[in-house]
Image (spheres, rainbow, N blue to C red):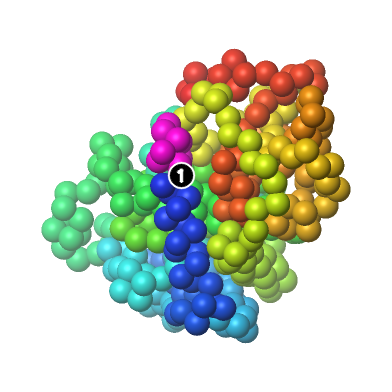
Amino acid sequence: MRTKLTALILLSVCILLFTSFSNTPEQGSKPFVVVLDAGHGGKDPGNRGNGYTEKDIVLDVTLQIGKLLEKQEGFKVIYTRKTDVFVELVDRGPVANKVDADVFVSVHCNSHHTQAYGVETFVMGIDKTGKNLETAKKENEVIFLEDNYEEKYAGFDPNSPESFIGLSLLQEEFLEQSILLAGLVQENIVKKLNRKDRSVKSAPFWVLHSTYMPSILIELGFLTHKNEGPYVDSKKGRQELAQQIAEGIIAYRKILSLSSSGEENFIVETTHEEVVHEAVEEKLYDGIIFKVQLAASSKQLETKSYNFNGLDEISRSKEGRLFKYFYGETSDYAKIKTMKSRAQQSGFPTSYIVAFKDGKKVLLSEVLHPEDQ
């Protein structure tokens, strides 16, 4: 996520508002098109942790997501596969491009040689630390099962970090929206199903890089974990995961509608604080509380969601003659960035992250680690 220039932020917000307006069902425009991608399939079983088969689990979950969305007015669902067939990675993203989809969602299951567990949701990007490269490699290696893969992928090597340079360029325009969608899905699964939160992350997935719309990849859980594997494979687990993913997509569309029609209720306070480069990496800061500052007003409003375009977790403080309103409260910098994106697309385009230490506001640049600036 790049917010180095204020002008670039405002331009991206304007583009988003125009896009969301054109996608709002009340305007009589095209339906909200969701392309669902069940990972693997056919000769590619995916991971086989604990004897389970990833391709079967993700197909079932994906079809259930689609059925739930199809019950919603104004949604149209398209699948990259609906049966146990092999679909090449190079063909999955273009399915979404051809139908001018609003979002692309790819569903997978994780595995690891340890007892790692938890749900994580990815957007397209280059992970500077390399921590997320292993997951991307595993999902990209399906390329080796394809005929003439050297020609189709122009020399791309899933095992070579150098090959990832440039993959994120096509998705960069939609990164803010992708992070918002990923955050909504991740938050639903974690909070409502009580799953371990492995956060929203960035990694170079081939299946995401060529799409021309907000795109995410969901890892439902680790089949290799002694408890999580059986849950993800179970009928109950599949149904619950599908429900929360569908609700996250529905919430995303609702936020777009709100951002296109919501009226401004506040004196929005602009900031002259330094703009900090943000990367999608899990980052906890002990002793620091991050919040998203939404606005400032001379009016003392109740901190209820109906006063803040549906946002909850609102707090208020008084500074001088103005009341300042904040969204969220966490020591997780990755989480607060997701919340900032949600706030911006809920009608607060100039909202920004602030930091507190021992109850006092401090400069963001003074508390962030160098790699996060």
Amino acid, disc 1: Leu
Residue 40 appears left or right of 238: left
Span highlighted in magenta in the image? 1-10
Name the spot of residue 243 as percent of width and height, x first: 67, 70
Q: Is residue 9 magenta?
A: yes
Residue at 60% across, 83% down: 73
- Position of 321 relative to 67 (above/below): above
Q: Residue at x 41, y 66 (%)?
A: 40
Query: Image point 67% across, 42% down: which residue?
Result: 267
Frontmost residue, 119 versus 192: 192
Q: Position of residue 70 (x, y in %)?
A: 57, 82
Residue at label 1?
A: 10
Reply yes or no: does residue 223 show up in magenta. Answer: no
Compared with residue 364, is residue 102 higher up or lower down, i.e. above or below?
below
Residue 143 in view in this figure: yes
Where does the image place residue 82, in percent across and percent down from the top left?
45, 81
Q: Residue furthest top?
A: 366
Q: Nearer the viewer, residue 221 or 18?
A: 18
Asked whether, in this view, residue 210 is left or right of residue 11, the answer is left
Apparent side of residue 28 relative to residue 286 in the rendered image (left or right) = left
Q: Residue at horizontal 36%, vertical 72%?
A: 100
Measuring from the top left, give residue 252's x and y in whole percent: 59, 62
Furthest toward the left, the residue is 151
